[in-house]
Amino acid sequence: MSSYRIALNFEDGVTRFLDCRAGEKLLDAAYRNQINLPMDCSDGVCGTCKCRSETGTYDLGDDYIEDALTAGEAASRLVLTCQMRPTSDGIVSVPTRSSVCKTAQQKLATTVTRVTAHGDAAVVLELQMEGDCRPQFLPGQYINIDVPGSAASRSYSFTTAPGENHLGFLIRKLPVGLMSNWLSHAKPGDRVTATGPLGSFYLRDTERPLLFLAGGTGLAPFLSMLEVLVAKQSWQPVHLVYGVTKDEDLVLIDVLESYVDRLPDFSFTTVVADQGSKHPRKGWVTDHMPTGLLSGETDIYLCGPPPMVDAVRTWLSAHDISPNSFHYEKFTPNLTLKESA
Ligand SMILES: Cc1cc2nc3c(=O)[nH]c(=O)nc-3n(C[C@H](O)[C@H](O)[C@H](O)COP(=O)(O)OP(=O)(O)OC[C@H]3O[C@@H](n4cnc5c(N)ncnc54)[C@H](O)[C@@H]3O)c2cc1C
Ligand code: FES
């Protein structure tokens, strides 16, 4: 029997994947997977089970009343999980915390396979899952990696595609920092645990051209998104503007160049803020926006340190640019201050 892979993205950013059988109601599939989605009547009457379908196709069902789901809500992709039956893979946002639904983040056990330093700017950390585990996540999401030898953890966006045994991360090297210090002596064979996946910054359906805006290691989630676009053979135009502070912060340019060959319509520009740099494009990401891609017809994704994200958001609103689909994530240093939309 065929089934569809549905990602439930909870309000606290936790994501759980489940297989929904063809013709099965989402609420029933969740229950079968020990996830208690909010519900009351299970009859399409109360509206308690209302969620938003972010991507994918579905049959809404016709056994519910207007008080539970209005025509306007249905048009904006709100669904009643006690009635809707997915007809493709998709993502559903659940407007409640994962703990309320008796589900939680997953613990991942991994081993370091490679640590590659890019000067003093960044480190690429490669981990292998124990056993044949291939964690599912949405491209753009992150996990919390426990810093070995401490009780703390730090958040890092996947650079690799979902569903692989091998996980990659691009991590900024700070002169002094808990994870940065550990990375300076991390070696293959070290055991590392993590929890996740998390986050509401992920690639939605690609129905329009995409503009990716990355600041520093904010490049990381876009690498995962690009991998998925390659796997999907996406023909949508994708342009990335990658801004850094100093020349040496520009890393993985060869990887970005490889996407020019691997995707039908991918281009990127790099920008360096340091005025002493010999780079042909100096300044901030906002000084080098591709004007042709700034109409409401382009989906914009933005990721980087909080000042960069705030500056771009301010610039977009000052230029009256309100994309159809706009998503951002700040690499906030303090773990309690994650912000994404
Ligand atoms: C959702 C999310 C995803 C993230 N993904 C990534 C990622 O893919 N790659 C990545 O490199 N980082 C990412 N981060 C940031 C990361 O979680 C850590 O905050 C960062 O790596 C610093 O960790 P550390 O242990 O080395 O330093 P810490 O011990 O946390 O900090 C040491 C000192 O440096 C300061 N500091 C921390 N970060 C910065 C900074 N960026 N600039 C200047 N000073 C700073 C701290 O305030 C503190 O004083 C992400 C953050 C969030 C919230
Ligand atoms: S649980 Fe009442 S409408 Fe779905």
Image: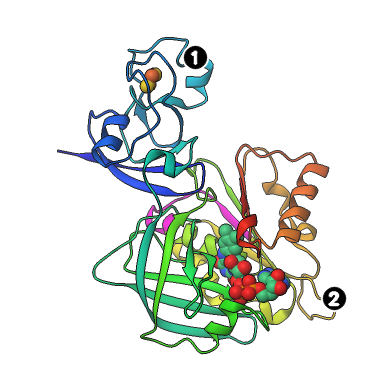
Mark 2 touches mark 1? (CB < 8 Å): no
How packed mark 2 is, by other alpha carbons closer than 10 Å (few <14, some 14-19, many 20 or more), is few
> In the rendered image of this protein, does residue 163 appear above or below residue 209?
below
User: Of 326 and 179, which appears nearest the observer?
Assistant: 179
Residue 237 visible in image: yes
What residue type is disc 2 on? Gln
Which residue in the structure is indicated by mark 1?
71
Q: Percent position (x, y) of residue 141?
A: 49, 56
What residue type is disc 1 on? Ala
Task: Write the start and end of the magenta stretch as one range.
Answer: 228-240
Which residue in the structure is indicated by mark 2?
275
Location of residue 155 (image quadrant): bottom right
Does residue 190 appear to the left or right of 118 in the view shown?
Answer: left
Residue located farthest toward the front when viewing the structure as drawn: 151
Q: Percent position (x, y) of residue 187?
A: 43, 88
Residue 219 visible in image: no
Location of residue 114 (image quadrant): bottom left
Residue positioned 71% across, 56% down in the render: 309
Q: Is residue 238 magenta?
A: yes
Q: Secondary structure at mark 2?
A: loop
Residue positioned 52% across, 25% down in the render: 76
Residue positioned 65% across, 63% down in the render: 334
Q: Percent position (x, y) of residue 243?
A: 70, 67
Q: Is residue 333 magenta?
A: no
Mark 1 vs ligand 2: CB below 8 Å: no
Mark closer to the chain start, 2 or 1: 1
- Way the structure is coloured: rainbow
Q: CA distance from mark 2 to mark 1?
A: 54 Å
Q: From the image, state whether disc 2 or disc 1 is nearer to you.
A: 1
Q: Quadrant of the C terminus?
A: top right
